[in-house]
Structure formats: C-alpha cells, structure tokens
Image (cartoon, rainbow, N blue to C red):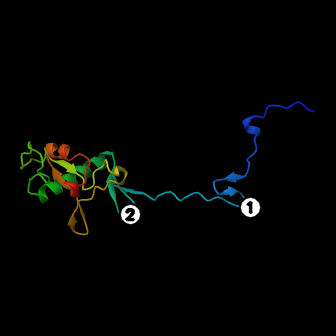
Amino acid sequence: MKPSRLIRKTEMRRTGFHRHGPMKRGEVIHKPMPRRIVAVHGVLHYPDGREVCDKSAAGKKEYNRRKEIMWRRQHGICGLKISNLCPVFITLAQATFEHQDGRGLGGSHRDDRVEIDGKPYNMASCGACNIAKGSRRLEDL
C-alpha cells in the first residue's frame, strides 16, 4: 500500500459540479451581463431610467441645482410640513433634498430626478421635517 501524500490547493482538480448538478462535457457557464451605467456631467444614468448624482464636484453641483429647482417650484415652502419645528417658509440654505422613496427603503434604488413624465417627483423640505420623515415613503405619512 502506498503512503498517501498531501495535495496542495494548486494541485486540486475541479470536481465538475456546480449549483445545477454536474457539468456536461463542453458546457459553458455564462456570467450575467453587468449593468450599463452611463455617467454624464456627474450624473449616473441607469437602464431603468433612474438618475443619481455622484459624489464628484460636478455631481454635487448638479444635486444643488436640482434642490434649487424644487425649492423654486415650491415657492420656498417646505414640502412636508410634518414637524412641530417646521418654519413653513425656508431659505435655499435651509432646504434639503427630500426623496420620494426613502433612501433607507431601497436606498440602492435612489432616484434624484426632479420630475418624471412632467410630474413633480422629489421635493425640497426643511431639515426638521426631513428628520421626522426618516426613511418612510411619502405615501406612508
């Protein structure tokens, strides 16, 4: 009887098994295609139509521009008005970007668009109302 020897990891052979059972000879496993994300001037455009401002200088500038658009659309009024500390009328410096769908609930699917199909989507709000809302969706308030 021959003595057994240790097999190094580099010498180990593939067993030919994967999650659907044994591989057949000549079978090829295809990896899923990566999502195609297009970045234009600090904004990431996803295949599903979402737009997300990135953390570059151009992205931050675009994020603030969109916040100003929402603030002007609302005539300087807080979009939520749910906190006791809400001043109702806010300055542009007090305005925060309020996402329609809370970033905590599917934050990976964040959408920074100001309007979708001509309808307002996100809004500007005061910091007190933004904190009071938390990550809940607007429909839940």
Q: Position of residue 42 (x, y in %)?
A: 33, 52
Amino acid type of disc 1? Gly
Residue positioned 35% across, 52% down in the render? 106
Q: Classify mark 2: residues with Cα within 10 Å, few (<14), some (14-19) or many (20+).
A: few
Q: Position of residue 98 (x, y in %)?
A: 21, 51
Within 10 angstroms of label 1, few (less than 14), some, or many (20 or more) residues? few
Q: Residue furthest right?
A: 1
Of 98 and 36, the residue lying toward us: 98
Of 20 and 96, the residue lying toward us: 20
Q: Quadrant of residue 115?
A: bottom left
Name the residue that disc number 2 marks: 48
Decide if residue 14 is on the left or right side of residue 117.
right
- Callout 2: SS: loop
* Of callouts 1 and 2, the N-terminal one: 1
Q: Which three-letter amino acid code belongs to the residue tagged 2?
A: Asp
Compared with 86, 139 (above or below) is below
**What is the x, y in percent for residue 84?**
8, 43
Q: Is residue 28 left or right of residue 86?
A: right
* Disc marking residue 133: none
Residue 26 disc label: 1
- At horizontal 27% and vertical 47% (from top left) the residue drawn is 60
Instruction: Residue 29: name its quadrant.
Output: bottom right
Residue closest to the eye, 139 or 124:
139
Pick the residue in front: 138 or 48.
138
Question: Could you tell me how far apart the alpha carbons at marks 1 and 2 are, in whole angstroms?
Answer: 35 Å
The extreme bottom residue here reads 117
**Residue at screen point 8% across, 57% down:** 75
Q: Residue at x 34, y 60 (%)?
A: 50
- Image quadrant holding the N terminus, namely top right
- The local secondary structure at tag 1 comes to loop
